[in-house]
Image: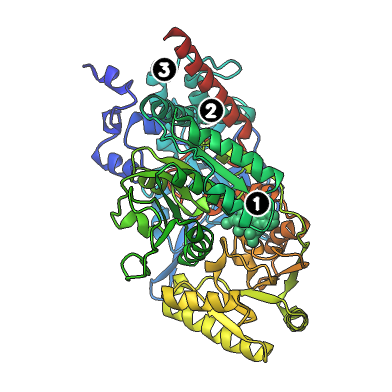
Amino acid sequence: MSPKTRISQPAAHVSSLRGVGSERATQLARLELFTVGDLLLHRPRRYEDRRHFLAIKELQPGVAATTRGNIVALGLKRYRVGQKSVFEIILDDGTARLHCRWWNLPFMEKYFAAGDDVFVFGKPKSLKPRTIDHPETEVIEGDEESSIHINCIAPIYPLTEGVPQRWLRSLIWRMLAECEAHIVEPHPEISLAGFPTRANAIHRLHFPQAMSDVEIARRRLALDEFIELQLAIQTRRKKLQANARGLPCGGDNRLIKPFLAQLGFQLTTAQTKVLRELRKDMAAGVQPMRRLLQGDVGSGKTVVAACCALMTLESGFDVTLMAPTEILAEQHFQNFRRWFEPLGVRVELQTGGRKTAVDGRKRLPLSTPNPPPSTLFVGTHALIESGFTIEKLGLVIIDEQHKFGVTQREQLVRKGRYPHLLVMTATPIPRTLGLTLYGDLDVSVIDELPPDRGQIKTFVRAADKLPKVWAFIREKLAEGRQAYVVYPRVEDSGQLGVKAVTQEWERLQKELSPYTVGLVHGRLNANDKEHVMTDFRAGKTKVLLATSVIEVGVDVPNATVMLIESAEQFGLAQLHQLRGRIGRGAHDSWCILVAAARTEDAKQRLRVLEETTDGFRIAEADLKLRGPGELLGQQQSGMPGLRFGDLAEDRELIEHARSLVAGRFNQLQNFA
Ligand code: ADP
Ligand code: MG
């Protein structure tokens, strides 16, 4: 193979490029640039319009700008016995002089010489004399490639030590000259009307003619990323459809009927509608259900899950119900035992801390010992890690999905032979994530709260208002209500964190005496946690001081006050979850967000919660402010890295990609 054909392959190693020896290759590797393809997609971190730059005289203090001048003086000063240094160059462009300084980087000296023509980008810190500290600079050399460095819009790349901006730009320019004609459309069968070709987009990304080219290029490259994502999602779905038969889990109503009769309330219209959708999936026996059940906090997802579990149990299959925390698993275990044991259904708990089957808990007398009755297993992620297997698993329910990663979801489902999957979340999934991260799930929504719920009022308060807040809480306790006080997480900071929350607990006991205060945090063992929760549920303790371990699922209708300390440390979606712990009964509820930091940013962010209880608006705001990782929880994995696409902003591109890919699958089907 001639070197030239090698270079035109995106997979070719960078060292096959002219001018890239082993030292340069090592440097590029530090930027994760290994192949020609990586270089092609190396995204400039900004662009500098070097056709329209400011004269030195026009520079404004504090305003970042590009300017240009000749070096009229330069020098390195060392002080403190040579330990510290400042290197300075003085530029002149005929209108004024500019001082550029670098502190403690003595090697900068070797990059400049008197008379050099230099581009400078930075924020002047003063005008007397005009000074920029640590600017970005580029010496202009009058070689044959100068047209890509000056009098143009120049790309400014992320760099690593030892790689000059100018060298990298030249490298990419030369490589593009050779490769551009060989850049192929990744999916020529998908027509991308209205977008430039991929080759053209890559060219514009690096060497735009106008600033508007940059966004045009980004959109095309983002679209390609979303198309890949949709192909992966839709292919996975087709495979499932082709290979897997759903188990017949529609049931015969023999358990559901008595269950609903003793529940004490009517299902809402939304719950009934959703249940109908789920039953259709589970009964059909065509393909296993893969469904996301979305419903705001308190909308009553648990009862719906219970009905699905009963359908499966009626059909002779086992069910697992997974929760993200031990507290929530324990709560579900107690609820479901209360609901199901009178129906003769066995309920077992499997968490890291507790296993009912193992610790010798008395099993129920079984009404029909043969065939063995079906079981509901309630657990945490320990269910996955234990190597625990279930022979006749018919349905997997995952509660509060945003705490589980995609990989975990897959692992769990693989415990059985294509069981049905119901994923429940109270975090409203913004549409962009619904189409990507959850793209392989159908969606049902409970869009109505049970009737007769009290209102929740939300206030953001500065820490100095706490005395008033305590008085208010005492008033509510005197009326017989209960309260949560949430303290930022202690789990991360180990013993220190536990000490801090324990001190807070002592303070709170004094503050609110004679009312009793319980303390729960992630470092307590399972039995202790359960004791604290039982006391609070029973009203024995009036106030619960908790870390965000109580965030999901906990259901104590008499608790009507939620005070969150250092609220600025939480994400909005997480605060919305926490707030969902109140407003569960008929009484009005109050959520008080105490912001320690008085920065405008933090307060502005929290205002969203004052203004709305609409989980969707909150999730969208959070996605914009903090990105998908935060919204979905730390463990959330399985989302491919997007270089050009933006999950918060690119909804329209994501939808476009989805319909393009769906269209292609339909075409294939017509041919088949
Ligand atoms: P979430 O959707 O947040 O998981 P839960 O399932 O915990 O909500 O339900 C919240 C509360 O509402 C529970 O106390 C539950 O018993 C109650 N609930 C559920 N459905 C109804 C209904 N249709 N009518 C009245 N109360 C209901
Ligand atoms: Mg719940």
* Residue at 49%, 78% in the rendered image: 531
Relative side of 661 to 611, left or right: left
CA–CA distance between discs 3 and 1? 45 Å
In the picture of the structure, the residue carrying the numbered disc 2 is: 223
Q: Earlier in the sequence, mark 3 or mark 1?
A: 3
Rendered location of residue 384, percent (x, y)? 35, 54
Q: Secondary structure at mark 3?
A: loop
Give the class, few, some or many, for how many residues have Cα within 10 Å of label 3's Cα (few <14, many ≥20).
few
Above/below status of 534 relative to 355:
below
Rendered location of residue 158, percent (x, y)? 46, 44
Residue farthest to the top, as pictured: 671
Q: Amino acid at mark 2?
A: Leu
**Is residue 495 in view?**
yes
CA–CA distance between discs 2 and 3? 15 Å
In the picture of the structure, the residue carrying the numbered disc 1 is: 296
Q: Secondary structure at mark 1?
A: loop
Label 1 beta carbon less than 8 Å to ligand 1: yes
Rendered location of residue 416, percent (x, y)? 34, 43
In the picture of the structure, the residue carrying the numbered disc 3 is: 184
* Residue at 52%, 24% in the rendered image: 201
Q: Quadrant of ligand 2?
A: bottom right
